[in-house]
Image (cartoon, grey):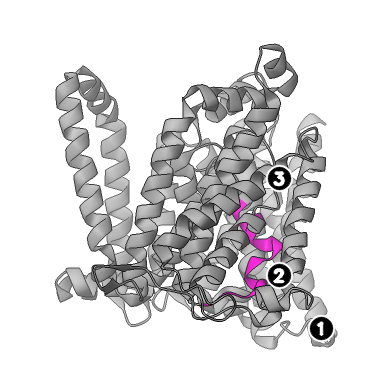
Amino acid sequence: MEPIRAIWRYGIKIGIVGGIVLVLMALIGMIEVFTQRQVVADIISMGHTLYLAAGLFICYMAARRTTPAKPLWVISNSIFAGLTTAFFLVLLIILGRNVNLRMMFINASDLLLNNLLTFGVQGNNGLRLLLIAGMVTGLITGFFYLLPKIVRTVILWSLAGSAFAGVLQELIRPILANNFPDAISEWLLTSDGLTVKGAISIFIFIALAIISWSIKGDGIRQGWQGLPKKQQLTWRTIGTITLLAIILVAPWRLGLFMSEVMTIVGLYVLLGLGLNIVVGYAGLLDLGYVAFFAIGAYVTALVTSPEIMNLNWSLWAAIPFAVFFGILAGVLLGVPVLKMRGDYLAIATMGFGEIIRLLVLSDALRPFLGGSQGIGKIAKPQVLGFVFKGPQEIYYLIIAGCLLVIFVSWRLKDSRIGRAWKAMREDEDVAQAMGINLVSNKLLAFGTGAGFAALSGVIFGSKIGSIYPHSFNIMVSINIVCLIIFGGIGSIPGVIVGAAALIGLPELLREFAEYRFLVYGIALVVMMLIRPEGLWPEEVHKREMHEGKANGATV
């Protein structure tokens, strides 16, 4: 009875959840819309890649949740999850043949139900194929889960890398055209997706890289640790200079579109680094962070634009002024919420953010803040007559701001103030008992984060040239919190990785913008299940997560 109980508990239950998820993905049009882009030309589209990846993930979770992890039970659970998921899709197709689903779900087209979900096989044969595909997917996933970890890692990352390259073909194509011979581009890409040999080449390259690192990685690390300090410093300096050189030439080698994407990512990196101090270092959940971003932008607009106050300051004169008001606003926000924690603090700060947005939108303050019409003609930064006007020029201003904020964050992290913030984050009562002044340290965290947000607002206003209230809604704050969680709370590299993943990728896939927040949600759910500490976590958080697993805790 115990094996049957395990199959019921894990395989079928997870399969039901997975089947509902895939049915919803189909009915809202994700699969059909994503099918418009080919990953491997004439072989598999982005829609089918998403379809298969979701099925594989469901079966993998069923295998992972099997307790105890006996091979037969793992494979059985995975097969049952795959079959159950496929059964829900079969029910959807049968229902769609007998009921006009388009009266409620406009995306439930004949193309979806009778072609895409069954991989082009028509009629009852398509339904049988779907059930067989679900069973085979579960079988393959179950065996995959039982493989040694290194084999799983090689296969997973190699497949993911190949799929990723196919999805981002519009980014890869100009990079290859501008920097490599035409033969390489022709080998890897067609006019519509990767070539078969290109996909295989990427798979093999990634697999060899992972295998090589698994064999020689420990030796390289030990050799690095054995080097004298002067040699380590020399190599670090060379690496830093090389990285900076790549960053500096990137906008001119990648083109105008990629420069625009990188400027948007850079702005969110600036915002994320500021909120990382508040949330990641001090543990204060601030959902009104966009208010300080707005304050920086509006102060810049008021003192540099001729439309309201007609002061006509330069942007460089406006920066310290805007940052000062951002810090002041952060401290003023911190005063009334000093005794709040957790959800209560999040709600209070969210209210502050909405108050600022409604104030700049109101008709009462329209003569002073522009109202819904916003403020235009914001000054562009200039250096010795050179104007930073396009994304390729503004990029360097953002990079300078990011480097400054990274340096400050890095210096604060292990300073006396940074250690006080971390103590507050872990337990405020214990921190206070140890002699840490909660009032001054909380206000300092709010003020520092707000100052960085105001700096981002300055650059944003200058980049756009005009600002409007709708640019500062609550979703900006939520996006910043999401990228911090996704990258790794408290981690400076994690903020950069999170911004690239959650801000950069959606910008590169603009044709699928209507599913942006759905993909956000899916990515966050998957991250919490697979890697709750984030993509590039802080060592303390990573250690805590692994300790929890070692002690048998469910994450």
Badge 3 crowding class, 10 Å Cα cut-off, few under 14, some 14 to 19, many 20 or more, is some
Which amino acid type is marked by label 2? Val
Quadrant holding the N terminus: top right
Relative side of 470 to 375, left or right: right
* Dot 1 or dot 3, earlier in sequence: 1
Q: Nearer the viewer, mark 2 or mark 1?
A: 2
Tell me the tag on residue 332.
3
Seen as rendered, the residue at the extreme top is: 434
Name the magenta segment's main secondary structure. Answer: helix
Q: Quadrant of residue 429?
A: top right
Question: Tag 1, which secondary structure?
Answer: helix
Determine if the magenta segment contains residue 184.
no
As displayed, is residue 262 above or below residue 425? below
At x 72%, y 66%, the residue is 357
As displayed, is residue 479 above or below residue 173? above
Residue 554: x %, y % from top left: 70, 30
At x 64%, y 86%, the residue is 111
* Dot 2 or dot 3, earlier in sequence: 3
Residue 73: x %, y % from top left: 67, 36
| Residue for badge 2 | 360
Determine if the magenta segment contains residue 470.
yes
Which amino acid type is marked by label 1? Leu
As displayed, is residue 303 above or below residue 295? below
**Alpha-carbon span between mark 1 and mark 3:** 54 Å
Q: Nearer the viewer, residue 106 or 91?
A: 106
Residue 217 visible in the picture: yes
Span shown in magenta: 466-480
* Dot 2 or dot 1, earlier in sequence: 1
| Residue for badge 1 | 101
As displayed, is residue 482 above or below residue 280? below
Q: Quadrant of residue 172?
A: bottom left
At x 46%, y 38%, the residue is 409
